[in-house]
Image: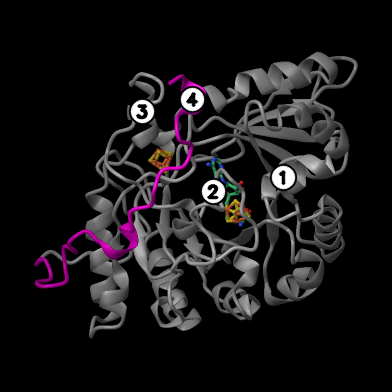
Amino acid sequence: MNDRDLPRIVPLIDLRLSALPMPVTDHLPESRISGTGQLTDTLGRPLRDLRISVTDRCNFRCNYCMPKAIFDKDYAYLPHQALLSFEEITRVAKVFVAHGVQKIRLTGGEPLLRKNVELLVEQLAALRTPQGQALDITLTTNGSLLARKARELKAAGLQRVTVSLDGLDDTVFRSMNDVDFPVADVLAGIEAAQAAGLGPIKINMVVKRGTNEHEILPMARHFRGSGIVLRFIEYMDVGATNGWRMNEVLPSSEVVKLIHAELPLVQLEPSNPGETAARWGYADACGQHDKALGEIGVISSVTQAFCGSCNRARLSTEGKLFLCLFASKGYDLRSLIRGDASDADLSSAIGHIWQGRSDRYSELRSALAPDTGFGGRRVEMSYIGG
Ligand code: SAM
Ligand code: SF4
Ligand code: SF4
């Protein structure tokens, strides 16, 4: 049997059911940790970014995320009562903000499928950091419902959106979303978001070698000079169902080389610490960054790990706290929220969990041979949020 004959889809083990023991469920540690905005983990990384998954459902079946063979009509999504309510999410988010979170990203699944998600945006937009600052609130979407929702999201207090788009060619796009969804409707959603003032808009393109690398240049030409930042993401080995192989990863360095050959680029400084994307600006005739032409970003999660500055926590749809995108288990905060824990208990629990964090999956993976898996089965990206 050669490499091509190997089965591509790995059966799903339901990791949603298991959880890490809470340091606090049975007995609260004597040392209490309250929100000072100064929390750091074992590697000195602060807590700044919270990603909240608001649904595990999606209307697309991107094969790198929710392959149809697994996420079929019999797939058991979480029942409604398992999901955190908007009030529960806001309560937890407030505690995270007291610990230093400055940015909240809503994700999923497809977050715009969660009914009345704008009401959650409104509640989160009312939170303030210990210094009295408003939060940076954003959302990642496949764009399918954006044309309908952009204005109400903006009115609710959403500042920006990131739209996932893997190509401009309709046939390629329909085949990658695997539900025959037309690219024109996503482009209309992006236009609506621009018109509503949900910017600066970012576009995420997952690049899979052999599938859509020929879409890199058309995408770069299309968004250059539009005020939209196009970001190329290396295809990652998230979850356990997408049959990931290293030979399908196109390193970001090749993406930059390809674009630079036609549209010259200059490297830019990171805009903030913990930034996942390396920034490249389009150059003018003198080789300087031409701001009117804008910039691209490359997210090299596989070939250049950025765990050293990872300041992100993830809250799953049913209220588990994950410390890494590649974790196999999360901490069950919902049991605290729905139990009799006070906000101070919740704060102390989150403080102890973050202080114990040592995750750095991508850095450790880079030290391994290609295609080597380790660390046990991982949760799916559609459940934990991207
Ligand atoms: N449904 C929304 C969307 O597609 O934008 C939000 C959730 S999705 C899980 C968040 C991001 O993760 C998307 O930009 C998607 O392209 C990215 N993603 C999903 N699976 C990935 C993989 N295997 N490698 C790299 N990025 C992936
Ligand atoms: Fe859905 Fe987003 Fe995953 Fe695609 S990447 S299947 S749109 S959750
Ligand atoms: Fe952060 Fe984990 Fe990704 Fe490293 S592998 S950057 S720790 S989420």
Secondary structure under tag 4 reads: helix
Secondary structure under tag 3 reads: helix
Q: Residue at x 80, y 72 (%)?
A: 148
Does the residue tagged 2 have its C-beta within 8 Å of any atom of ligand 2?
A: yes
Sequence order check: which comes first, mark 3 or mark 4? 4
For the residues labelled 3 and 2, the Cα–Cα distance comes to: 20 Å
Sequence order check: which comes first, mark 4 or mark 1? 1
Residue type at mark 3 is: Arg
* Magenta range: 1-30
Q: Residue at x 45, y 74 (%)?
A: 89
Most extreme residue toward the front is: 1
Decide: is 382 above or below 90.
above
Residue assigned mark 4 = 246
Residue 167's image quarter?
top right
Does the segment drawn in magenta span residue 7? Answer: yes
Quick check: which quadrant has ligand 2?
bottom right
Residue assigned mark 2 = 65
Judged by depth in the image, the label closer to the viewer, 4 or 1, is 1
Residue assigned mark 3 = 365
For the residues labelled 3 and 4, the Cα–Cα distance comes to: 11 Å
Q: Nearer the viewer, residue 378 or 32?
A: 378
Residue type at mark 4 is: Met
For the residues labelled 2 and 1, the Cα–Cα distance comes to: 14 Å
Name the mark on residue 244.
Answer: none
Residue assigned mark 1 = 175
